[in-house]
Image: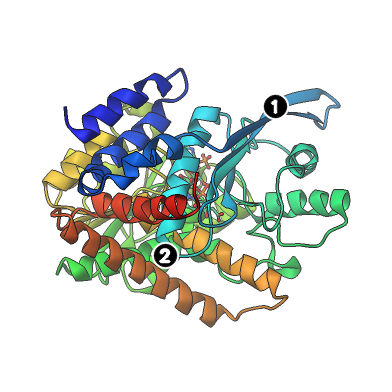
Amino acid sequence: MSVAEDNIKKFENSNCEDNNVFYQAMEEVIYSIAPLLESDDKYSRYAILDRLVVPDRVLKFKVVWMDDNQKVCVNTGYRVQFNNSLGPYKGGLRFHPTVTEGVLKFLGFEQILKNSLTGLPIGGAKGGSDFNPKGKSDFEIMKFCSAFMTELHKYIGPRIDIPAGDIGVGSREIGYLYGEYKKITSSYEGVLTGKPYMFGGSLMRPEATGYGVVYFTNTMLEIESKDSLEGKVCCVSGAGNVALHVIEKLQDIGAMAVTCSDSNGTIYDPRGVDLALLKELKLEKRLSLEGYLLTHPESKFFPAYQYEEDSHAVWDIPCYAAFPCATQNELTEKDAQNLISNGCVSVTEGANMPCTREATDIFLSHNICFGPAKAANAGGVVVSEFEMSQNASMTKWSYEKVDEKLKEIMQQICTRIALTAKDYGVEGNYVDGANIAGFKKVADAMIAEGI
Ligand code: NDP
Ligand code: 2IT
């Protein structure tokens, strides 16, 4: 039995109930790092893998709050503090009805390796709640955030654990969470990132993940001697923070994003997505994408309910580069085949693990340039770390400084994982390159820190 198969079997028991996505993320890493484990037995002597796949702790708590009709509501809150070998626990909070411990373990595990790849001193964590922000009033969001922080504040701190945003958590929610933390602790410190600029947020944090995805993609295309994105048609899924800023940066550099999507369906606008309208619909008014048709009747809307679970309208549209930016496992085997048949050359994961294992394998076997999430979407956490630095030193960096440093780190991540893949005999495989490079740094730190 190979090292990878041996390890897969060992951890199979953790595949309980809601752990499927966690197991999926772990399995990919186990296969990728097999050559590293075979090349040096110190990793097995120190039981690094056994230690890395178990979070340091999982905090689970009850969140009780009152809605606008004075109904008492109960949700579950979590913080999975996974690993702090490289720095304090760091990672986002997700508010979505699909949140479970298993989902947060998958996201926290990915975050360890992502944060390691940035080269910055940050460990890995994730948290959130099964609270559904959709349709809630601003006041209800505030009440929920206050109740959530009443528990969470016990476990976080600027040198302990620094949460940020993710699905359903943007600067509005971070503002309310921060306000409550400050009220409870009387401490004005950088305990959350993604704060509004006026009280400690970094310039460019909202744009960082999406812009970073585009910087990463152009570096990958250059290394692989492919045409850059300029002038090319691109398909983007999602219509949230990451998708909007991928579309914005694509437009900035002269590429054309022709799609976006939300949980109700996909918009295809062959003349290029109207970003101002998209921001108005999704950021200001928080409405469904269908409203796009009212002022753009020449575009098309494909309702999600008309599609089987294994295929999605957004990946059926011909493009040079694809950017899945909504949620996990949103791009399937069939979608991957459609993209390739339509001539797609490059796929970059803006969301966390948006491609199923089968879809990823198809892209790799067809030599598609494939940028894995833990490398390609690291720009968000990179600028979060810049926000921590600015807060700690009570300074503010200019937009140009943040952008320049972000671009430099995205290029470094891309180059490093390309070189790592080459060193381990899998040239062009950015999945293996990212997993090996990310794992090695954390593993070496764990060994150096003793057991
Ligand atoms: P947002 O909440 O801003 O947007 C999420 C988007 O995805 C919305 O358009 C939403 O549609 C859609 N979506 C969410 N869940 C589903 C689902 N189950 N089915 C279909 N559509 C869905 O989140 P972000 O843009 O911040 O996050 C998107 C992805 O990027 C996530 O995977 C997140 O983990 C990842 N990410 C985010 C970072 C950040 O800095 N924010 C950093 C790195 C990664 P609708 O509007 O209908 O709900
Ligand atoms: O998945 C992610 O990297 C994020 N949601 C951002 C984490 C952060 O701490 O900024």
Pointer 2 residue: 212
The answer to whether residue 203 is visible is: yes
The kind of residue tagged 1 is Asn
Q: Tell me the amino acid under the disc marked 2.
A: Gly
Q: Nearer the viewer, residue 386 or 222?
A: 386
Q: Up-down: is 142 above or below 321?
A: above
Q: Identify the image quadrant of residue 187.
A: bottom right
Q: Residue 183: x, y in percent?
A: 87, 51
Spot occupied by residue 25 in the image (x, y as percentages of width and height): 36, 37
Which residue is at 70% across, 27% downward?
Answer: 75
Coloring basis for residues: rainbow
Pick the residue in front: 288 or 253: 253
Helix, strand or loop for disc 2:
helix
Horizontally, residue 347 falls left or right of residue 394, namely left
**Badge 1 density bin: few <14, some 14–19, many ≥20, Cα 10 Å:** some
Name the residue at 83% across, 27% down. Answer: 69
Please state the horizontal and vertical placement of residue 181, each as a whole percent of the image: 80, 50
Determine whether the residue tagged by mark 1 lies in a helix, strand or loop.
strand
Viewer-closest of 443 and 178: 443
Left-right relation of 160 to 269: right
- The residue drawn where x is 26% and y is 55% is 433
- Name above or below for residue 88 compared with residue 254: above
Residue position marked by numbered label 1 in the rendering: 75
